[in-house]
Amino acid sequence: MTSKTTDDAREPDALPTGRWYLAGALLVVEYVLALYVFDSERLPIGQHSAAFGVIGKSMPLVMVTMTATLLIGGGPSDSEKAKIVAAFREPRRTWPLFAGHVLAYAVSLGVTIFVFNAGLEVTQPWLWVALWAASAICSFLLLVAAVVPGAAIRPLAKPVARAVGVGLVVGTLALFAGAATSVLWRPMSRLTVEIVAFLLDLTGHEVVSIPDEFIVGTPTYEVFVDEACSGYEGIGLITVMLGFYLFSFRKSLRFPNALLLLPIGMSLIWIANSVRIAALISVGTWISPKAAEGGFHYAAGWLLFCIITLGLVAVSRQSGWFAVDTPRGKGSFRTPEGAFLLPLLFLIATSLVTGLFSTDFDYLYPLRVATPLIPLWLFRSYYVGLLSPWSWTPVLIGFAVFVLWVALEPPASPEDAAVIPSALTEMPTAVAALWLLARVLGSVVVVPVAEELAFRGYLLRRLIDADFTAVSPKHFTVASFVVSSVAFGALHGRWLAGILAGMIYAAAQYRRGEISDAIVAHMVTNALLAAYVVIFGHWAFW
């Protein structure tokens, strides 16, 4: 029996990071759902109270403060850290708290869908809004309680307060800097219009672009790129944020190399703003103008700002070109759960976000291929131990699953079968080829690796023991075999074919105790499906 583990993963006192990843996954999914259904302009009491207007205006400060806190805020002292670690290592049952969190969130979402409806007249609107707010707060507190043990709250309070204080100061200065760059809005708006028009042109649809009047869009939906949408504010914000980061961590960064983070950050934030506007126009044109002008339009900009700022810092801390002392080797990450779960979580999160911009055809599918590569690269040292000698058996198993999948696929309607070829026909040839290449690479390489790491590498063993890295990939139990296969089938929507495929991939792993055998089998299945789709035109399989 063999078990591919790292020395760090075997430590008996390793922190229970699995619940952190679960909380992160829940937050991503719930944020996207809330973004889709919430629109503050449809508040049933909006015309009678300025309270929500004040809350809305304060959100930029909240978002920037949170980002600055994570970016620059100081950590706990050694004594505080010891108490916190000890509290987190204490075993405790958290599933009731997670269940309560999901239930409270469901209540909050249900009230949101019911009350925040433009055509609905409700009696006692304040009561409904209070129920909405209470369920949302309760959901948040239950999630915090599930992740943070009670014994860790007191030693965490001081470092968190210090970090938030620093974040508030830096965030306020960053907002002022963003406002101070307002003189740039006219030339930047003109450039933004041209970039957005270029991005829209890639879709093959007719584009309306009047740079001198700051107007861009399509014949059915166009926008005016005003001062707030030009991108200048984001440039000011990220410049101050990264400037404080460079100063605060100057002893651990390589100069002048680290100074490149400033132009990189400014460029990324400006490009991201253009992508956001292009996405807004796409949603308004092909989905719904109300959806484009609702909560998504406002929140997407701040979400991109947080992702780019924190992402740049994370990359710089792991890059030997930017940082002096970068973690190396297998001990660079002490969270084996991340190595097995994050690729799939990145894939699912990206799918949810791109789904907001799509109806039947996902034009942004290449992003699904790109984002899981981030954790796969960061945790690459973990995967070296998963490689095994070549065997033809996984190839044969993958072929068998392909035959099974095709046999169990229900007949597709002509409308469903025509979605992808119709969309590809409307695209410029180069863009269509790029999309098709990304679809094949994602299906054949990225998806099998991400799914097998999560379902066979993690879940199959986690259902046997909390310390899943100590469980051999050959260890069979009926419960883990069935539950992990059912979960795999649920993810794919094709219940029977998915469950059977999950069971067969698990059998591939059991044969030699090699996770890579399940990955190879899955890759072969998807490669054959991709060839079947492209060569014979059975697009419904995608």
Image (cartoon, rainbow, N blue to C red):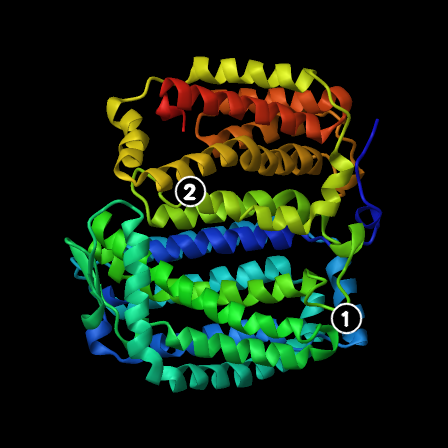
Residue found 33% across the figure and 74% down from its top: 188
Give the residue type at disc 2: Tyr
Q: Earlier in the sequence, mark 2 or mark 1?
A: 1
Residue found 70% across the figure and 46% down from its top: 380
- Along the line of sight, the residue nearer the viewer: 192 or 20: 192
- Along the line of sight, the residue nearer the viewer: 52 or 270: 270
Above or below, 89 against 211 in this view is above
What crowding class fits label 2: few (fewer than 14 Cα within 10 Å), some (14-19), or many (20 or more)?
some
Quarter occupied by residue 273: bottom left
Residue 207, image x and y in percent? 21, 54
Residue found 28% across the figure and 65% down from its top: 193
Residue 174, image x and y in percent? 48, 82
Q: Nearer the viewer, mark 2 or mark 1?
A: 2
Give the residue type at disc 1: Lys
Q: Which residue is mark 2?
A: 365
Q: Secondary structure at mark 2?
A: helix
Above or below, 141 against 95 in this view is below
Please tell me the numbered disc located at residue 81: 1
Residue 526, image x and y in percent? 52, 25
